[in-house]
Image (tube, rainbow, N blue to C red):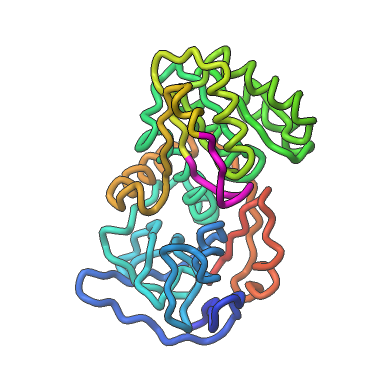
Amino acid sequence: MKAAIIRAPGQGPAYGDFADPVPAPGEVRVRVSAAAISHVTRSRASGEHYSASQDFPFIAGMDGVGRLDSGRRVYFVMPRAPFGSMAEQTVVRSQQCIALPDNLDDVTAAAIANPGMSSWAAYTERAGLKRGETVLVSGATGTSGRLAIQIARYLGAKKIITTGRNPEALSELKALGADVVISLTQDAAALDQALQEQFTQGVHVVVDYLWGEQAERLLIAAAKVSRMTRPLRFVHVGSAGGAVIRLPGDVLRAAPVELMGSGLGSVGPDRLIRVLRHLFRVTVKAGFRIAVTPVPLSQVDTAWSGDDSQRRTVFTIG
């Protein structure tokens, strides 16, 4: 079969031939129709992610959409290594497949799964977001951040604050549901004042896609003006702004803060499957918007390096 093959650490996928998978007991074969590039997919393919396989060669991709031998259309996640989702076929445990609603097309389902799950799990499984609360999305201009705005509104957030760098993307956030947009490119004093103003008014949940310096800045701003009667739930999801923070200890003494992460290790597989079922069921009804670039899998060599954080690249197969 044809597949996107990773042959060595640090190499991108190459389009080529790979042995057909044979389902083991408890597994099902999926004839894949769509699979998206995500930050996790890239990180796993490079060998940098904590869940990455160290055995080569293997097929790129951790999730996708396709049909079982029975004809049922499903979203699937975490195929058995060395098989991935970016191939004509793959194999996966039956429990890791979710039947898709008829009104949700293959490309949209593949595109929205990973970025939509990231914030939905952060809100519901980690932060316990309640209707009427205020949410701050740190790093809201990428695909995941844009969905985090829409999902927060759907889940009942009363006020949504966003931060980001890209001026053009920032100008579009209010149309997606953001109430406040804060540019991270302004000078440090103005940025700190803008953040402290929002924390003074009250923030209940932070969903953070940046980490690094901006996470430090947010936590310090919260501590300086803290009037919170219940803890700020700060959920770390991504590290686009840096892998490490330097956090003064008095920040945690000055304000009630619950610092937590949301990802493959901190949210169990059964809970992630539950999140995805909810997401797929409401995507069309809620009108969630996600920019997508469909590309044939045969063009993986060029499309992989040209992936744009503003749009989700989805490889189409068959």
Residue name at image x 59 percent, y 75 percent:
10
The furthest residue to the left: 25
Placement of 312 over or under 302, stated as above or below: above
Where is residue 170 drawn, in percent x and y?
72, 34
Q: Quadrant of residue 20?
A: bottom left
Magenta residues (range): 236-248
Placement of 231 over or under 209, stated as above or below: above
| Residue 114 visible in the displayed image | yes
Prevailing secondary structure class for the magenta stretch in the rendered image? loop
Placement of 300 over or under 101, stated as above or below: below
Left or right of residue 126: residue 191: right
**Residue 246 magenta:** yes
Q: Quadrant of residue 42?
A: bottom right
**Residue 237 magenta:** yes
Question: Which residue is more in the foreground, 65 or 305?
Answer: 305
Residue name at image x 46 percent, y 37 percent:
235
Q: Quadrant of residue 217?
A: top right
